[in-house]
Image (cartoon, rainbow, N blue to C red):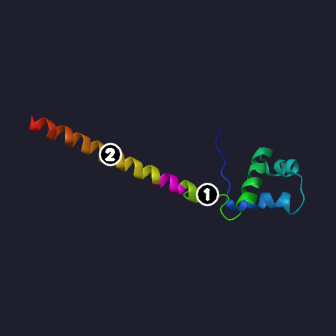
């Protein structure tokens, strides 16, 4: 089964169908061929943070972008630490 992808505009229009036009969630989900849980999740995301809701491909929320940057920095620091450990062990061997 292929996972369907929906545009940001489609998601906002689906949410508006329920919130502004008063269509029941169950009916809107049936009309749009969606699971009710998906539509309800979209509604939660849109109401919680309307500006950053549905970031789409290649766009991350600020928190996720920060976490990714921190993970990258941790990996870099671990690599540097490992190099220094190997160098210290090498020079300790040479000194004896």
Find out whether residue 67 is within the magenta segment.
Answer: yes
Name, please, the residue furthest toward the bottom: 51
Q: Which residue is mark 1?
A: 56
Q: Is residue 32 above or below residue 16?
A: above
Q: Nearer the viewer, residue 26 or 72?
A: 72
Which residue lies at the image location 46% right of the left edge and 55% below the top edge?
69
- Direction from residue 75 to residue 34 in the image, left or right: right
For disc 1, the neighbor class at 10 Å (few under 14, some 14 to 19, many from 20) is few
Mark yes or no: residue 60 visible: no
Give the Cα separation between the discs numbered 1 and 2. 32 Å
Region rendered in magenta: 65-69
Mark yes or no: residue 84 visible: yes
Q: Position of residue 32 (x, y in %)?
A: 80, 52
Q: Which residue is mark 2?
A: 79
- Direction from residue 15 to residue 68 in the image, left or right: left
Q: Is residue 48 above or below residue 81?
A: below
Q: Position of residue 10 (x, y in %)?
A: 73, 59
Which residue lies at the image location 85% right of the left edge and 50% below the top edge?
25
Looking at the rendered image, the quarter that the N terminus falls into is top right
Q: Nearer the viewer, residue 92 or 26?
A: 92
Rendering quarter of residue 79: top left
Q: Secondary structure at mark 2?
A: helix
Q: Secondary structure at mark 1?
A: loop
- Direction from residue 4 to residue 59 in the image, left or right: left
For disc 2, the neighbor class at 10 Å (few under 14, some 14 to 19, many from 20) is few
Which residue lies at the image location 14% right of the left edge and 41% below the top edge?
91
Task: Kindly indicate whether the residue at mark 2 contacts the one at mark 1 (C-beta within 8 angstroms).
Answer: no
Rendering quarter of residue 8: bottom right
Find out whether residue 20 is within the magenta segment.
Answer: no
| Label 1 vs 2, first from the N-terminus | 1
């Amino acid at each position: 089964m292929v996972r369907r992808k929906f545009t940001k505009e489609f998601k906002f229009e689906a949410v508006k169908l329920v919130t502004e036009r008063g269509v029941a969630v169950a009916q809107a989900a049936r009309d749009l061929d969606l699971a009710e849980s998906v539509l309800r999740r979209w509604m939660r995301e849109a109401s919680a943070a309307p500006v950053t809701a549905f970031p789409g491909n290649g766009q991350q929320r600020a928190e996720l972008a920060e976490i990714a940057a921190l993970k990258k920095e941790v990996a870099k620091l671990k690599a540097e630490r490992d190099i220094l450990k190997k160098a210290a062990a090498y020079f300790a061997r040479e000194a004896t």
